[in-house]
């Protein structure tokens, strides 16, 4: 469950971690992943890695590359979260400067036979997901 605004104690740590973002992106790209920032940036730097090419490196290989490249240490083990995300917390230097890193699952997708028809017809392509009307419609 997400924390409320009263529960979040902001600090400057995410700004220090964000300074590493361009170099982090380079490492993730070499391993086939795109990297995005999300979250409030109040307590830590929340990053989501998204598989971007057909063959990507395992999350553990990327974390190993980060540990070798930066003064970063791994906090705890990888944990499995909702929607198949694999998460890892990394500590930068000392103190409370941290990166919460989530990897979306790398899934091989075969195009459904009726995918093109589904997209053109406006019917949901997968599961029970349905388009919603915006307030502008």
Image: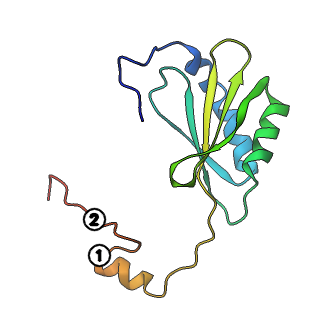
Outermost right residue: 68
Q: Quadrant of residue 105?
A: bottom right
* Mark 2 vs 1, N-terminal side: 1
SS category of the residue bearing label 1 = loop
Q: Quadrant of residue 32?
A: bottom right
Give how far across and how far down residue 76 sits, in percent: 71, 31
Q: Is residue 111 left or right of residue 51?
A: left
Q: Is residue 30 left or right of residue 137?
A: right
Residue 135 in the image: above or below residue 7: below
Q: Quadrant of residue 3?
A: top left
Give how far across and how far down residue 85 sits, in percent: 58, 50
| Residue at 57%, 37% in the rendered image | 47
* Mark 1 surroundings within 10 Å by alpha-carbon count, few (fewer than 14), some (14 through 19), many (20 or more): few
Check disc 1 and report the residue beneath it.
122
| Residue at 76%, 39% in the rendered image | 63
Residue 137 in the image: above or below residue 47: below
What is the number of the mark on residue 131? 2
| Residue at 69%, 36% in the rendered image | 24
Residue 51 in the image: above or below residue 26: below
Give how far across and how far down residue 108 sits, in percent: 63, 70
Give how far across and how far down residue 25 sits, in percent: 67, 40
| In contact (CB < 8 Å): disc 2 and disc 1 | yes
The quadrant the N terminus occupies is: top left
Residue 84 in the image: above or below residue 112: above
Q: Is residue 1 left or right of residue 19?
A: left
SS category of the residue bearing label 2 = loop
| Of the pair 93 and 86, the residue shown nearer to us | 86
């Amino acid at each position: 469950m997400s924390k409320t605004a009263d529960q979040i104690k902001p600090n400057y740590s995410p700004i220090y971690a964000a300074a590493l973002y361009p170099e982090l992106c380079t490492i993730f790209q070499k391993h086939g992943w795109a990297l995005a920032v999300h979250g409030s940036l109040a307590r830590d730097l929340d990053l989501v890695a998204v598989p971007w090419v057909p063959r990507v490196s395992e999350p553990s290989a990327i974390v190993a590359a980060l540990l070798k490249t930066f003064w970063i240490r791994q906090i705890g083990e990888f944990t499995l979260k909702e929607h198949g995300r694999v998460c890892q917390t990394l500590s930068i230097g000392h103190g409370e400067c941290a990166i919460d890193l989530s990897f979306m699952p790398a899934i091989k997708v075969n195009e459904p036979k009726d995918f093109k028809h589904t997209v053109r017809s406006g019917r949901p392509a997968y599961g029970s997901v349905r388009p919603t009307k915006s307030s502008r419609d």
